[in-house]
Image: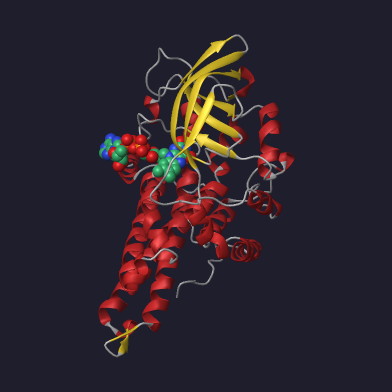
Amino acid sequence: MFNAPPLPHCFSPEHEAFRDALRDFVSREITPHVAAWDEAGGFPRDLYQRAAALGILGLGYPEAYGGTPGDVFHQIILSEEMARCGSGGVVASLLSHSIGLPPIARHGSDWLKRKVLPPVIAGERIAALAVTEPGGGSDVAALKTTAVRDGDHYLVSGEKAFITSGMRADFFTVAVRTDPAQRGAGGISALLIEADTLGLSRHALHKMGWWASDTAHLRFDQCRVPASHLIGAEGQGFKVFMHNFNAERLGMAAQACVYAQLCCEEALAWARQRHTFGEPLVQRQVIRHKLADMVARTDAARSLIYELAWRLHHSHGDAADLVGRIAMAKVLASQAMQLCADQAVQILGGMGFMRGTTSERIYREVKVMMIGGGSEEIMKDLAARQWGF
Ligand SMILES: Cc1cc2nc3c(=O)[nH]c(=O)nc-3n(C[C@H](O)[C@H](O)[C@H](O)COP(=O)(O)OP(=O)(O)OC[C@H]3O[C@@H](n4cnc5c(N)ncnc54)[C@H](O)[C@@H]3O)c2cc1C
């Protein structure tokens, strides 16, 4: 019931073999440790290298820079199988390069790609994306961090908030305003800033969930950044960052469905073995209805994700329409996750409130899925705009 047979028009036997290898890795190297890593507020740095050895960090990047070819279905599988560990915090930090690297891979100079891609793909260096500012994240075009040209360098000043892998990252892909005279999307550029740059300071933030992920506030105080670190053309940064979003949102949606499914699985297992008033919980119609709703909502979101992945893969349909549908798939998947986490905790009763159950962790983590990578409100606005209303 929870694992419908693979869809042959999306997933080939080669995709399924990739899934099996990932599932094996995650179940051996990650899942048994996530509760302890959550309590410790982090995971061992060598996990990056172990993931890299399996090709996880290089998926979809050019082979010339150490990457492994992969299509959108490989990306969906990666999101799904990583999420099976049940800790969004581990997944977010381990894969923070999946939002930090694409701007460089797509728009960076060959020199920049050679500098950044191979060590990150090998798990030796960590990459992060720094767009959000204390003054706001949804309205990216309003960002205030400035990069003023000074000879062969830019002088960068400003702040970034809520940056995943912010404490450990070696490379930041940063959204800056290179033309302070221009307001809005014009005048925004993308810049690579290294963590050891003089004038960059950072401090850790404490969160409701994603405890295993480090999240930081960054402050740039007149940081001198070589002009060769510009990613793409000056003033074209907005487009560079917007390119990230389809993949990020589809990946988050696929993860959300797995977190929802984990809640269903834990709730069903509990309902089967927990007896009240002489009967197992699962015999109660009210509990069975909850479980049926949880499975159906998860299935519906997942089916949409697979359909959209298929359309992306085959460039099927209008690109703007697809942007809207992907945005709404993220909304539906995170809502399914929210419903399942809520109902699973309810079915588990007091046990669902205890640290160490998967549902308790996912209940704490669902909010960030509804805020990060484009909040629910912004996703709905975006979809409405794409659809012309
Ligand atoms: C754990 C975590 C990790 C993150 N990691 C990163 C990262 O690695 N890199 C990075 O750059 N950012 C990261 N973020 C930031 C994230 O992308 C932003 O939090 C998100 O984009 C929302 O921005 P905001 O928090 O500034 O909220 P705001 O933009 O201030 O919005 C606040 C609320 O108002 C709503 N809202 C805003 N505008 C409108 C509108 N026009 N109409 C209706 N409602 C509106 C929003 O939906 C939201 O509910 C992370 C956030 C968290 C919590």
Q: Quadrant of residue 67?
A: top right
The image shows residue 98 at horizontal and vertical percentages of: 56, 44
Residue that extends furthest to the front in the rendered view of this protein: 40
Give the residue drawn at x 55%, y 58%: 82
Give the residue drawn at x 30%, y 69%: 346
The image shows residue 26 at horizontal and vertical percentages of: 60, 62
Q: Is residue 122 above or below residue 355?
A: above
Q: Quadrant of residue 182?
A: top left
Q: Is residue 316 above or below residue 142?
A: below
Give the camera-side residue of 56 and 215: 215
Give the residue drawn at x 74%, y 39%: 64
Give the camera-side residue of 366 and 59: 366
Q: Quadrant of ligand 1?
A: top left
The image shows residue 385 at horizontal and vertical percentages of: 32, 38
Q: Is residue 301 left or right of residue 17?
A: left
Rendered-image quadrant of the N terminus: bottom left
Residue that extends furthest to the bottom in the rendered view of this protein: 278
Give the camera-side residue of 168 and 341: 168
Q: Is residue 53 above or below residue 186?
A: below
Q: How many marks?
A: 0
The image shows residue 192 at horizontal and vertical percentages of: 58, 28
